Image (cartoon, rainbow, N blue to C red):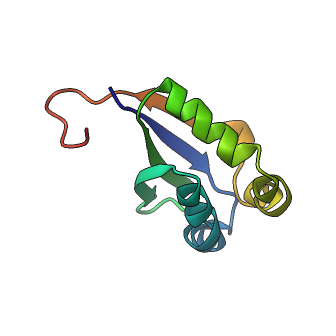
Amino acid sequence: MPLYEIRQYEIRPGKMDSWVKMFNEETLPYQVSKGVIVTGIFRGETDDSVYFWIRRFESEEHREKLYAAVYEDDHWKTRLSDRVGEHINRETIICSRVVPLAGSVIQ
């Protein structure tokens, strides 16, 4: 059964537009190149500090494999990680792991 991560970030004041640009142009393509399936990306309708994204994994083993591929790679460590930290407050990240129920259109 697939599992999903719903990740909620607090975006630093004044950084939403540059975060969205960086995520769409760099972070997202990088993660996808490693095999990560991103099923949704959202920002707050009226709150510029709220950002969500959803990732899909086939299993816990698959999630662990992709985490290693993404976060242990030199590109992440040297080109993206520090810049991500300039945009998001890592201390307030909420990562909810969920599984879809039978009535969900996301499977």
Q: Is residue 6 above or below residue 15?
A: above
Question: Residue 71 occupies which quadrant of the picture?
Answer: top right
The quarter of the rendered structure image containing the C terminus is top left
**Does any portion of residue 49 appear in the rendered image?**
no
Residue at 40% in and 62% down: 45
| 104 to the left or right of 4 | left
Which residue is most to the right? 78
| 37 to the left or right of 100 | right
Which residue is most to the left? 103
The quarter of the rendered structure image containing the N terminus is top left
| 70 to the left or right of 85 | left
Residue at 57% in and 69% down: 20
Residue at 50% in and 59% down: 47
**Does any portion of residue 47 appear in the rendered image?**
yes
Q: Nearer the viewer, residue 103 or 9?
A: 103
> Whole-percent x and y of residue 31?
58, 55
Q: Nearer the viewer, residue 30 or 8?
A: 30
Question: Residue 63 occupies which quadrant of the picture?
Answer: top right
> Whole-percent x and y of residue 72?
77, 43
> Whole-percent x and y of residue 38?
44, 52
Q: Nearer the viewer, residue 6 or 60?
A: 60
Count the labels in the image. Answer: 0
Question: Residue 48 occupies which quadrant of the picture?
Answer: bottom right
Q: Is residue 19 above or below residue 65?
A: below
Residue at 28% in and 30% down: 100
> Whole-percent x and y of residue 88?
69, 53
Q: Is residue 10 above or below residue 45?
A: above
